Image (cartoon, rainbow, N blue to C red):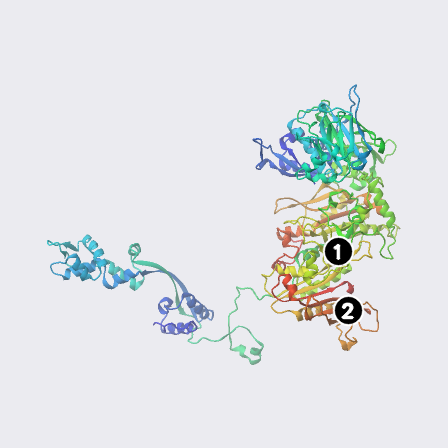
Amino acid sequence: MPTISVDKAELYKTLGQEYTTEEFEELCFEFGIELDEDTTNQERPIVNGKQEAPQLKIEIPANRYDMLCFEGIALMLNIFRGKTPFPNYRLVEPKGGKMQTVTVTKDTLKVRPYVAGAILRNIKFTQASYDSFISLQDKLHQNLARQRTLVAIGTHDLDTIKGPFTYEALPPKDIKFAPLNQTKEMDAEELMQFYENDKHLGKYLHIIRDKPVYPVIYDSQRIVCSMPPIINGNHSKISVNTTNIFIEMTGTDRTKLEVVNHIMVTMFSQYCAEPFTIEPVKIVSEHNGESRITPNLDPREATAEVDYINNCCGLEESPEQICKLLAKMCYAAKPSTKDKNIIDVSIPVTRADVLHQCDIMEDVAIGYGFNNLPRTSPNKASTIAQPLMINKLGDIVRMEAAMAGWSEVMPLILCSHDENFAWLNRKDDGKTAVKLANPKTAEYQVVRTSLLPGLLKTIRENKKHSVPIKLFEVSDVAFKDISLERKSRNERHFAAAWYGKTSGFEIVHGLLDRVLLMLKTAFLTHEEGLEGKKLDYEVKEDPSKPDGYWIEEIDEPTFFAGHAAAIYLRLDGKQARIGEFGILHPTVLDKFELRYPVSTLEINLEVFL
Amino acid sequence: MSSSQNGPQGELPSEILLALSKSEPILSSEAFPLYKSADAKSALDRLGSRSMITYETIDREDAILEPEAVEIEANGSHEARVFEALSKALGGLTVQELEKAVGDKNVAKLGQGKAFKSKWIAKGKDGKLVASADSIQDVTREQLQIISRTRTHPDPKVVTELKKRKLVKMQKVISYKIRKGPKFALQMVKEETDLTADMLASGAWKTAAFKPYNFKSLGADQNAGALHPLNKVRHEFRQIFFEMGFEEMPTNRFVETGFWNFDALFVPQQHPARDLQDTFYISDPKLADKPHAETEDDKADYEAYWKNVQGVHETGKYGSIGYRYPWAEEESLRLVLRTHTTAISTAMLHKLASQKGPDGRPPPARYFSIDRVFRNETVDATHLAEFHQVEGVIADYGLSLGGLMEFMQIFFTKMGIEDLRFKPAYNPYTEPSMEIFSFHKGLNKLVEIGNSGMFRPEMLESMGLPKDMRVFGWGLSLERPTMIKYKVNNIRELLGHKVDLAFIERNPAVRLEKT
């Protein structure tokens, strides 16, 4: 959520009322913005020898682009408080003169196809409103425009340039100009190098760097206004004294391009000699059918259902009353003349966040006050509670392990590739683990396929604890499974680890016996129907053989030779290896920095479902 | 009455008993000056615990003679020795003769000065030193003799003066005044520490002396197993959900697709939550299948759902103007680690849409889950790449916001949190969205305790749910309330391998309703 800093005294002046911090907090809370900080009683920075005036730092919902600046916050709060009607924003064509045009060449399709423009005439900035104007562009670039990828804004002193303008796309070598705040003229290739390590602009270069052509806006004298989305020309630079501003926007997302235009002009046209008037710009873009006059400030006409609104809010308000509430939220609404259940709603261009009547319904609720809405019983129908069976099973095992004197731990599910494989002396066959594309650290490379790394890391971090340490975890691991839509599946495992001066092998073995006993699974010995030593790892149904589990010695590099066994289970005639236990190999201990012997146990619980 | 020299410590108790049988009370520092005070105390405690003796501790400061003072005590002060030598010599002595007579050049030199001052000696006519008094009183020597004997002096000023003259120093001495106890005897009786089966069998319990139990210490360690505190809190939450008729969702699926995690929830493809900085994407396996049925009883039309989701994003549908951007299928098929369990709720609600209740419409449902979610966060005290999301969903006909708030009130009251307040908020898949706040007395401010809202029609109607079925959703993290409850400041002390095992072992049972 963006946070906007506003001058406290100026805001209260514009609101026509002084607030205590608590009162203002309350107003924000009801309206759905959040007072993050009031810097009145803090040490404030000194800028140009003057201490900064007390600021209010206000958090704005991410979809309310109309409140990304002082002007917007002040206006929306005044409308919400019923102090001001929503302004009547108007397009005013230039007196006698011809409308400014931007003609678009077809090559822009290769890099940044859309452009829009607007002109603010006879504007009078103060330093504060000028700063706000610059800051709004920045906020729009960061948020709605997704770091200038979707939309980039350029603002120019119209008195230094002369239309008609063109929006073209040219090879970088052919674009030459002195960029903003530079005197030296350079071509676009040089310019990209010049800004390569620039803290502010460097991060935008990738947007066009590898394109064959770069976008550029020229005036009629071939003066470069801007090379979006990177930088403006120095020639048309604006200042606090600029009176006529040409705003151009280019982008790859047409919807957001128009939103940005609307926000820029509605927020700052109040400083024009004739407030709330905007001079339109004609876009000529025949090749893609985008010729039009921008901006289009017509509100969007929509309808909302009275019974839907009342029903969702639990209210019984009249259409007229609902219209009054909507006025607090910037809408012009009136009951439909044709249908008593319909309200005709004009949605101003500033409210680009309104997509559906549910948004209108929410604004009625905010206008009414969430905390004033009548409470109703949430119990319409009765439903039946039901646990997830694998969780119920997991809880049984957790309880039994804890009752047997083991402590539960909750390590992370993500781990490094080495922890999951190499450190356990296991090989990655490439078909097992789900791997992450963009982790910030090597700690998170794969989704674990075993609970052992987490248990061993927990012991490593708790070596000061008295021994023996007896830990367990019941949780999920994940495996690749290309047969499924999501190409992976979870598996619920139970694992335990003993750390002590002796190996604890028999104790871990005993824990296995205990847990399986509690799961009503019998221990099978060879005398009870197991044949030979060789085992069939396939799941095979054989109802003639008794259900139960047995263990077979294994020789796997995770474990110390002669001290490890696989655990086999036969349930309903189906048999499978469900896990293993043993003394960890000393090389594994070494990797996890463990000084004493460790025995572990890990089994798949899903088979007991 | 002095004890045997350097007796081993083991014999001290018997020595004490023997000494007490002869006289009472005795003072340890006098009776057993060669034992260390700590050894004496342990012997006394052994006897004391058997009520054979009683004792009181006496802290005192003793004045001890410095080496110079020992010499003065033996031979007299310097000035006295000078006087002695002169008064024995008739006709006086020269300085050299005096030194010889005293036998110590230094003593003679220092003693002259003081003796002159006290007018004990004078210079004779021939320049020789002569005694000028008949007799003298050697006060210093007398004072030191008293201190040597009693280790103090009746006049405290004297001790202070002598300390200044560096003739005595003070030393702390702990000694014990020992008396016979009610069970005094000369022999120490063997004491039993525990009642054993053998004693029961032999009847020895009747005569045996038992060592008193120390009721001031803790009992024996139980070596108990323990459940993890976070899972204990999870259990309480689960119970609350069960009490309120909720069905647990199958959240045992970490890997999701862009479609289920985002698109189906009406989160646009350019939404910041989908950035690489926020979401873990999967490099292997690469791409998901398009949504399809994976069990035979799943009769839902996934193709229609896919088209609906695309449509509602791209051009708008169900009365929504949509986000109006070109929707990319590839983005939807990217595999991600779920960023919220709402991906599962979505699949559950989609399933619900094809179920038929008695009236032929999807039946009301209540779902919940508490499970791990993943965010590509930079790790700090309050953020980990993994945490647990508690999520609840209520689908029913004719639900209103008042019902949602009332439900949250009941839900949170069950964990001792009352006086909720609701703040308008923004969430791409709920409208209205309400942040839930409660006044925290400890922090003396409103704290956010969860998020809630009604799922957007764009999301629900795409699934085929009827327009008048409304769905509440709410969520909170499991870690945050646990951290507030147990005053844990760093999430890494609660989840992950860095958690202190002692914290797990000693954390009390969780009773959320107790505030």
Residue at horizontal 68%, vertical 29%?
A234
- The residue identified by callout 2 is A569
Query: Dot 2 surroundings within 10 Å: few (below 14), some, or many (20 or more)?
Result: many
Whether B257 is drawn above or below A514: the answer is: above
- The residue identified by callout 1 is A434
Between A400 and A430, the residue placed more toward the observer is: A430
Whether B512 is drawn above or below A238: the answer is: below
Label 1 – label 2 distance at C-alpha: 27 Å
Query: Dot 1 surroundings within 10 Å: few (below 14), some, or many (20 or more)?
Result: many
Tell me the amino acid under the disc marked 1. Answer: Val
Specify whether disc 1 shares its chain with disc 2.
Answer: yes
SS at circle 2: strand
The location of residue A313, given as percent across then percent down, is 78, 41
- Left/right placement of residue B379 relative to residue A573 reads left
The location of residue B156, given as percent across then percent down, is 30, 56
Between B48 and A222, the residue placed more toward the observer is: A222
Whether B244 is drawn above or below B19: the answer is: above
